[in-house]
Image (spheres, rainbow, N blue to C red):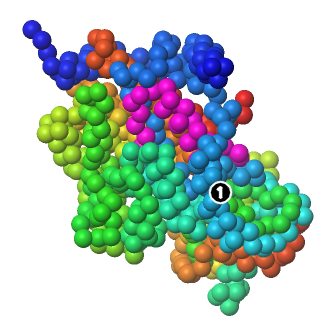
Amino acid sequence: MLNRLYQLLLIFLIFSGCSILKPADSLENPASLNPDSEIAALLNAYRPGVDAVMDKPIAVVKDTLRFDKPESALGNMAADALRFRAALELRKFVHLGIIGEGSFKTYLIPGTLTLGDVYEFMPYENHLVILQLKGDQVIELIDQVASVGGAPVSGARFRIDADNRARGLLVNAEVVDLNKEYLVATSSWAANGGDQFPALWNAAGRIDLDLSVKDLYVDFFQGRSELYNETDGRIR
Amino acid sequence: MTISRKEFLRRTALFAAGSVLPLGTVSASSGLLRSDEITILYTNDTHARLDPFPKNAKEFAGLGGIARRASLIKRIRDLQKNVLLLDAGDVFHGSTWFEVYGGSVDFKLMTEMNYDAMAIGNHEFDRGPDGFADAAGHAGFPFLAANYIVRNTPMAPFVQRQIVKEFDGFKMGIFGLGIEFDGVIDRSLTGSIRAADPIRNAAQITGYLKNSLQCDYIICLSHLGYHYSDARVDDYDIAHSVDDIDLIIGGHTHTFLDTPTVVQKESGKRVYITQMGHGGVRLGRIDLNNLGVTSDYNLHAQYYTIGEEE
């Protein structure tokens, strides 16, 4: 009986409390809703299958690592990983690496970085692409990076002036040779027009490698083992 | 002179076309279990986000989660007699759950939650037709795609062009549209399934739903995408080019529409387009009120953010 009264009271509260503005707001704020116990129980029954695979430790994150402008430790790692792996796969020097930070869905927090964490960091099914750009296209690319206040790049050093233009650009510690061909490692998403770097879209040559970018990051972080918030001033 | 209920509803709908309540306006709260209302709840592009977004997510940290969504849906079902629960596709891909279970856990839980139907998103092909069939075997609801030709493929047992749901004599026709394959889905993943023209198929199926099956209201569950600046077919094109659709529940472009877009047709008919972003961050809700009770039929749209803190 008492239960019944409480139910009626609850119904009364639901309808009187918040029904003034919108009819469906007569529901309590969804934030106050607990997870449905049946669905949560089912989910938890399957969870060990995910954990068994995804809890595998990959590295240890020592500092909070966020993407930032003009540069950040995390952004630098994200671009370095592409360039270093591309060089390894091609057995050739790769001049630049670049990727938009929009390709990454989390930042990294101190503690064990698991396989699942890396897949949350880079959840997309992209593969590694190496583009061949002329020197003038490299300058155009770096100007596009500067115009957005900086982005994850590897192999280039420059500063961004007050008008958001790149100044003092060095690629692999040399000034850009307008007639030289440069190799630029990136993701298929960026190469296909996904990120905000149009200079990548008219490459003279392109190599698509059958190598998933998410697995590339797993390997890269595993190789680092400890991740610190240290930048090198590549973009100033 | 008496008119049939259907004719009454049709006249009601025509009248209401010019008098739909501006969204978010004041309207009176209803009693319990109204049989003259239909509540449409919907999601799209949940992308295997069974758990809430992780706390270190750059966007939506802590939001979403299928168990909290289920809780909210149960509460709404407790209050509303006539509830439709729909998804506009791309349940596959996006979290470690998909890596391990390939969508089967999502479909099991959606079945427990009594989803009525789902459109087929491009990511539903991520593991090919066999991978889709493996997961779809766990789904107790149909997959709707009026423009995908799936005959003699592993997807065939699970895919229908349309369904009809009847609530107290009011017939809701629901059909699905899938995106074209070129440039979106790797050819190696689509097997012998073919994607046909969405506009032509939508026109054909709405004609069938309206004229042959006598539906009073037609919903298009679309995974085409909200609006493109180029020639790709989008929900706008469907709204403009196809007659007799009342509501398009869209997906693919992950668009968060706070209020539905209204497309006013030359005939005077209004078509509503809605989409709830992605990741199960929002549950969409559209209430059709006063069906056949007064001389007016209202549409009220809103959304809930799942897990949002005050």
x then y, percent, for residue B181: 36, 63
Q: Is residue A44 left or right of residue B191?
A: right
**Identity of the residue furthest to the bottom in this view:** A91
Side (left or right) of A68 relative to B24: right
State the quadrant of the C terminus of chain A.
bottom right
Image height of A130 relative to B136, above or below? below
Residue B105 appears anywhere in the view: yes
Q: Nearer the viewer, residue B309 or B244?
A: B309
Crowding at mark 1 (Cα within 10 Å: few <14, some 14-19, many 20+): few
- Residue farthest to the left? B1
Q: Position of residue B54 (x, y in %)?
A: 71, 52
The front one of B162 and A212 is B162
Q: Secondary structure at mark 1?
A: helix
| Residue located at (33% from left, 70% from top) | B154
Residue drawn 68% across the image and 91% down it: A91
Determine whether, in the image, residue A50 is placed left or right of residue B223.
right
Q: Is residue B80 magenta?
A: yes
Q: Which residues are magenta?
A: B59-86
Residue found 65% across the figure and 35% down from its top:
A33
Task: Say which amino acid is labelled 1.
Answer: Asn
Which residue in the protein does label 1 denote? Answer: A44
Decide whether residue B155 is among the magenta residues: no
